[in-house]
């Protein structure tokens, strides 16, 4: 009966939808393997659960509460998200679990977030959250529920090559999230499914609408999960002390005052408080560097100022998907921020603690604290934290 229902449904799907669901259903839609799906309240995780349910898996939805300091104010959507998850689980006819990882999140992710900002860097907590919470604490909890594997709504792919697993970019290049997943290891990848890896976002929303899921048109979440849409400076000021100081040019001219180095990032233009008139051409000012010892913010004029361009980058705190670093002699592509295409580069030095790259063309606003992620074609090799 399940086989007949499955083929009746799949015959009416688009080619992309059929490819995605057939991949998960191949050889498994008669086997009731339990898979726990991380459900956030958005359309992506809802469709991930939908695909697995239709492929015949025993699907359990899991809603993770990772922040509770101020979950009753106007900026926190946890309660609304849980209502949406419950509605989707009810429609799909799947069990729903709610688990609180707030303590783990604060200890493993948020504390590091604050340390990095206090040191003048701009961290990417989503990368650490994936490695420590969504694919570690979540995975352990899923195993306690009787699952062998977990699934999420991330746009990425996993494939097994011989005796190892590879992390691949998603087919939808505009939504690919492999950058945020680059710290996942072999043990984690062996137990994770990404049902959306073969789909385009438009197909995901189409599937959600066809299945009458109430989140089919829900706006995608943006920004850091525990900050939401709140003013960033207001949030950070609650946890870290700030000290105003001088803004100066590389030549040493003081051109203004900053409100605290932690509130600025390399390449920032808006919110500096300087008009673009000093160079005579009206070029806007950009943050180029931070002098932590002097509490000074270095600013320059012009998008292509030499201080904003980097031919080389050094990364530490390395994590390689395969468990070993890639070969130093090969050519790769690297991302130094999420919203960026891979830049052709070569590895000039690499060992257990450091990876140095040389780019074919200078990269703009390479920012300490962000992640440098290395690729070989569609394969994400891993990366580290930019120094």
Image (spheres, rainbow, N blue to C red):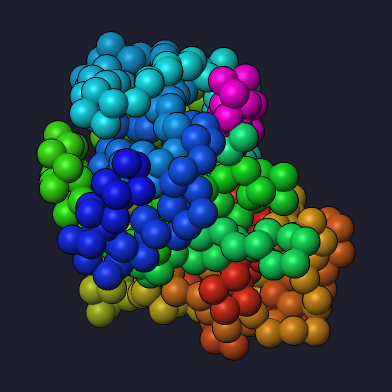
Residue at horizontal 82%, vertical 69%? Answer: 350
Residue 179 coordinates in the image, percent (x, y): 52, 58
Q: Is residue 59 visible from the viewing direction of this image?
A: yes
In the image, residue 4 lies at what x, y percent? 29, 49
Considering every residue shown, the one lying at the far bottom of the view is 360
Classified by dominant secondary structure, the portion drawn in magenta counts as helix
142 or 76: nearer the viewer: 142
Residue 297 inside the magenta-drawn segment: no
Between 268 and 383, which is closer to the camera in this rendering?
383
Q: How many marks?
A: 0
Q: Give the extent of the magenta segment.
A: 133-147
Residue drawn at (18%, 61%), measured in percent from left and top? 12
In the rendered structure, the answer to whether residue 129 lies left or right of residue 46 reads: right
In this rendering, position of residue 281 left or right of residue 166: left
- Dividing the picture into quadrants, the one containing residue 217 is top left
- x 22%, y 66%: residue: 14
Above or below 337: residue 87: above
Q: Find out whether residue 134 is within the magenta segment.
A: yes
User: Where the N terminus falls, by quadrant?
Assistant: top left
Residue that appears at 40% across and 69% down: 171
Question: Which of the two residues, 361 or 309, is positioned nearer the viewer here?
Answer: 361
Q: Is residue 205 left or right of residue 64?
A: left
The correct choice, above or below, for 297 with respect to 93 in the image is: below
The picture places residue 337, in percent across and down from the top left corner, at 49, 61
Q: Nearer the viewer, residue 164 or 55?
A: 55
Residue sitting farthest toward the right: 351
Indicate the position of residue 98 as horizontal and vertical percent values.
42, 16
């Amino acid at each position: 009966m399940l086989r007949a229902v499955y083929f009746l449904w799949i015959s009416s799907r688009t080619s992309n939808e059929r490819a995605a669901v057939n991949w998960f259903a191949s050889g498994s839609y008669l086997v009731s393997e339990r898979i726990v799906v991380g459900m956030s309240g958005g359309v992506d995780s809802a469709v991930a659960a939908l695909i697995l349910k239709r492929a015949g898996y025993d699907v359990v939805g899991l809603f993770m509460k990772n922040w509770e300091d101020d979950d009753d104010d106007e900026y926190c959507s946890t309660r609304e998200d849980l209502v949406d998850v419950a509605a989707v689980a009810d429609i799909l006819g799947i069990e729903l679990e709610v688990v609180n990882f707030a303590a783990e999140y604060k200890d493993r992710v948020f504390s590091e977030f604050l340390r990095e900002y206090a040191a003048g860097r701009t961290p990417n907590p989503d990368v650490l959250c994936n490695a420590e919470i969504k694919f570690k604490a979540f995975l352990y909890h899923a195993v306690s529920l009787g699952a062998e594997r977990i699934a999420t709504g991330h746009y990425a792919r996993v494939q097994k090559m011989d005796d190892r697993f590879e992390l691949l970019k998603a087919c939808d290049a505009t939504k690919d999230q492999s950058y945020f997943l680059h710290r996942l290891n072999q043990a984690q990848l062996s137990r994770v499914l990404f049902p959306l890896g073969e789909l385009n976002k438009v197909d995901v929303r189409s599937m959600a609408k066809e299945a009458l899921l109430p989140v089919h048109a829900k706006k995608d979440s943006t920004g850091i999960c525990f900050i939401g849409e709140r003013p960033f400076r207001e949030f950070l000021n609650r946890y870290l002390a700030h000290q105003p100081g001088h803004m100066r040019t590389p030549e040493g001219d003081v051109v203004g005052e900053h409100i605290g180095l932690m509130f600025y990032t390399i390449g920032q233009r808006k919110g500096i408080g300087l008009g673009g008139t000093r160079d005579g051409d009206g070029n806007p000012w950009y943050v180029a560097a931070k002098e932590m010892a002097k509490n000074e913010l270095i600013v320059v004029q012009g998008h292509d100022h030499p201080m904003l361009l980097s031919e080389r980058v050094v990364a530490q705190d390395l994590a390689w998907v395969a468990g070993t670093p890639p070969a130093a002699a090969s050519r790769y592509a690297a991302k130094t921020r999420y919203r960026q295409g891979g830049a052709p580069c070569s590895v000039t030095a690499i060992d257990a603690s450091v990876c140095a790259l040389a780019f074919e063309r200078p990269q703009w606003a390479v920012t300490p604290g962000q992640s440098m992620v290395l690729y070989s074609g569609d394969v994400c090799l891993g990366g580290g934290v930019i120094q």
